[in-house]
Image (tube, helix red, strand yellow):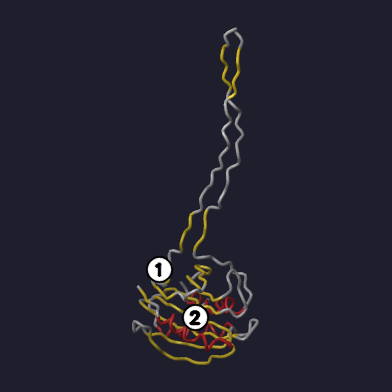
Amino acid sequence: MSFKKICFFFAFSCLMSCGETKVKNKPSAKTTPDTKTAAPVTKKPEATITQGKNGEQKITLGKIKEPTSTEVKPTVQQSKGLSSNGYYQSAQYGFKIKHPQNWDMLENQRESVPVVFMNRPKGTFSKGAESISIAAGSKDNVTLESFYNFCKTELIQSGETTGIVEESIGQNKRGQIFKRIIFNRKPNPIPSMAVSFIFVENNNSYVVTGSASTEKFNAMRALFEDVAGSIEFE
């Protein structure tokens, strides 16, 4: 997978957090198939013919059975990635990460973006909704420094940022090193900020990006750090 596809998360998460995109929500649990009721079938009564004492024939009609409806009960398929302990796990991309409580989860909405968490009213994409996206990919001989520089260049050239606020280095709860970049986003339609945590592990590249309106960013920063710090790689 190319670096460019991996870095697509910059433009994607910008649309998710700031615009009124109509990306379809893919719920973590869905009901299939729809409940259906079979159409009633009208049955004719069965007739019984008997011979009377005087030779006359007697016809007796049997009872008509009432039509019954057949209901197909729905089956619920839970998201394969969401565990009971509040973590999302992707076997395909080889990681697990904390799922923010009560946030919506969208899976596989874009190539190289296995999951996006969103804090929003149910069924809507509100302007400035907070989001956390995880982008993943792989490339031989990639290093943290080279991948970080590539992501930074792509971010600037994409025109999605109005300026970089901070660049730093840190480590997650398991001691794995990441590079952090905080930047202002181009208003779309409101001003917003984002922080990206960039990891490289065994030639696999991961970018965890938390985004919020400029007004709410500082309040959300601790949650973004906590979720990014919880990521574990297989």
Q: Nearer the viewer, residue 71 or 8?
A: 71
Which residue does the numbered mark 1 point to in the structure image? 84
* Of marks 2 and 1, the one in the foreground: 1
Q: Which mark is residue 114?
A: none
Q: Secondary structure at mark 1?
A: loop
Q: Residue at x 57, y 11 (%)?
A: 51
Q: Secondary structure at mark 2?
A: strand
Identity, as a three-letter code, of the amino acid under mark 2: Thr
Q: Nearer the viewer, residue 149 or 59?
A: 59
Q: Residue at x 40, y 83 (%)?
A: 144
Q: Residue at x 60, y 31 (%)?
A: 43
Q: Which mark is residue 209?
A: 2
Q: Nearer the viewer, residue 157 or 56?
A: 56
Residue 14 appears at what percent x and percent y? 57, 79
Q: Residue at x 43, y 77 (%)?
A: 206
Q: Locate the C terminus by quadrant.
A: bottom left
**The image quarter in which residue 200 lies:** bottom left
The residues tagged by marks 2 and 1 sit, at their Cα atoms, a distance apart of: 24 Å
Residue 77 appears at what percent x and percent y? 47, 59
Residue 209 appears at what percent x and percent y? 49, 80
- Earlier along the polypeptide chain: callout 2 or callout 1? 1
Label 1, residues with CA under 10 Å away: few <14, some 14-19, many ≥20:
few
Residue 231 appears at what percent x and percent y? 40, 78
Label 2, residues with CA under 10 Å away: few <14, some 14-19, many ≥20:
many
Q: Is the residue 218 above or below the residue 74 in the image?
A: below
